[in-house]
Structure formats: C-alpha cells, structure tokens
Image (spheres, grey):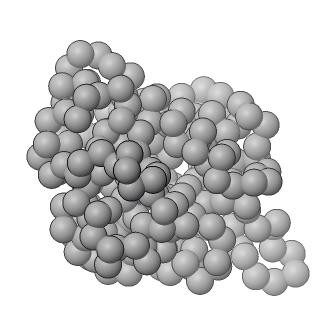
Amino acid sequence: MDPARRPHPLSLSEIRALEKQGLDQGLPLMSRAGQCAAGLALRYCQPCHDVWLLVGPGNNGGDALTAGAHLLNAGLTVTAIMPAEPAAQANDARNALKQWSRIGQSTQTTLPRMDGDNAPKRPDLVIDGLFGIGLNKQLGQPWQTMIDDINESGIPVLSLDIPSGMMADTGQCLGRPVRARWTVAFIAPSYALYDSASREFTGEWDVCTLGLQA
Ligand SMILES: NC(=O)C1=CN([C@@H]2O[C@H](COP(=O)(O)OP(=O)(O)OC[C@H]3O[C@@H](n4cnc5c(N)ncnc54)[C@H](O)[C@@H]3O)[C@@H](O)[C@H]2O)[C@@H](O)CC1
Ligand SMILES: [K+]
C-alpha cells in the first residue's frame, strides 16, 4: 500500500470498538474480511493453485476459513490445518467452521509433510489465520512448532490482521512470529504495522477497512 494512502494506525481498543459497532449493526464483517483477503491473495500470489490455511482457535481462524471458501470458489485447492477447535466464545469462527463443513470441506490438525519423496506438492501460498489481535500470551505448542516449520519452508505467507505471534498494539513478539511476505490488516492498521522493526515479520502490508470508517 503506497505510504501516501496509508490510513492512520488505531489502538487495539479503538479497533475493537469499531469492530463491535459494525457487528452490532449486523454487518457481515467476517465475510467481508474473508472476501477481501482472498482478493489480495489472488493478486499477490501468481500463479496460485494450492493454498494452505492455518486456522487458529479464534476469529482470526474464522477469517482464514472464510477466505479459503472464496479461494475454493475461484478454483484453487485449499487445505485447512486447524490444530484446535474454535474457542467457545468465538461465535463467528464457529459459524465459519460450520460453513466450511457445509461446503463439504474438512480440516486436519497437522501440517502436511513437506520433506521426503512422497511429500505432497508444496502450496503456492500459506494463509496465516492462527492469531490476530486476540494474542494474549506466549506462543505454546503446537503453534510455535507449526510457525517455525512454515518459516523454515520458505513458502510465501499472507498473514491475516497481524503476523501470528506479534502483539498488534506494540509489535512485541510473544515467541517466534510468522515471517509473512504480506499482511492484510482488517478495519485499520495496528501500531505494530507502522513500526519499521516489524517489517521482517509483516512484509508488505495492506488494509481492508470492511466498510467501517476508522
Ligand atoms: N468477529 C468478526 O466478525 C471479525 C473478527 N476479526 C478477526 O478476529 C480477530 C480477533 O479474534 P479473537 O478475538 O477471537 O482472537 P484471535 O483469533 O486473535 O485469537 C484466538 C484466540 O486464541 C487465544 N489465544 C491468545 N493467545 C494465545 C496463545 N499464545 N496460545 C493459544 N491461544 C491463544 C485467545 O483466547 C483468543 O480467543 C482479529 O484479529 C481479526 O482477524 C476481523 O476480521 C473483523 C471481523
Ligand atoms: K494472523
């Protein structure tokens, strides 16, 4: 996103307040987020046939599944890797998972093997929907190993909202974050995206405002 057009960063509480406003108005924020992220994935990743979704336990994971459904519609092969069930309170993520099953898709708990002769074809893109602005403690397992494996693989990553493992307000790393090629922030960029030290994890970043006026 060219610097001239960059929207101002917002704090977590300001982003949460806008998100709540939108949800209270019944706006389909998660489907808008998924659609916008899928559009950026198709723009960044050329050619793109095969995508892995990393689905975390909250609504960041719901965004990944929603984006994955759009990519399926675009004719791509999409594999959803979801180590844990959605958290009880993440209603939108639970609905996104229900929708994912309704379109006949399943999830698996671990990454496909990436080495050895019978390893499946490596994907063209990984979409990182493990943790967004809800990250609130040090990365534990299986999350940290999954992130290390993806970082070591060199497969290009599009991180949703913020590279998983990074605190959105401060850019503080709670473990070894995802090293994304691109990041798409929803609603508004968090302060972490403006911190040049975060660039090694965020890569190039863009914003999907979800139609909310920041
Ligand atoms: N609800 C909606 O419709 C929308 C939600 N949005 C997405 O929702 C995200 C925020 O969702 P959530 O608040 O559910 O949180 P996240 O999905 O960011 O985090 C997932 C859950 O992981 C748990 N967690 C935090 N740190 C952890 C750790 N180190 N190890 C294991 N578990 C950990 C937390 O309890 C949290 O509920 C945003 O980043 C954004 O991607 C946006 O797309 C706007 C629309
Ligand atoms: K993320």
Residue 71 position in % (x across, y down) = 67, 39
**Residue in the foreground of this view, choosing between 124 and 187:** 187
Q: Left or right: where does residue 62 sit relative to residue 107?
A: left
The quadrant where residue 50 appears: bottom right
> x, y (%) of residue 120?
81, 67
Q: Is residue 27 above or below residue 126?
A: above
From the viewer's perspective, tell me whether residue 55 is left or right of residue 92.
right
Residue at the image position 62 percent from the left and 35 percent from the top: 69
Residues 191 and 57: in front is 191
The spot of residue 53 in percent (x, y) is 58, 53
In the image as oriented, which residue stretches furthest toward the top?
25
Q: What residue is rendered at 30% in x and 45% in y?
A: 7
In this picture, is 2 found above or below 137? Answer: above
Residue appearing at x 76%, y 47% in the figure:
77
- Percent across and percent down for residue 1 are 46, 52
Q: Looking at the image, how many numbered discs can be counted on the residues?
A: 0
Residue placed farthest to the front in the image?
4
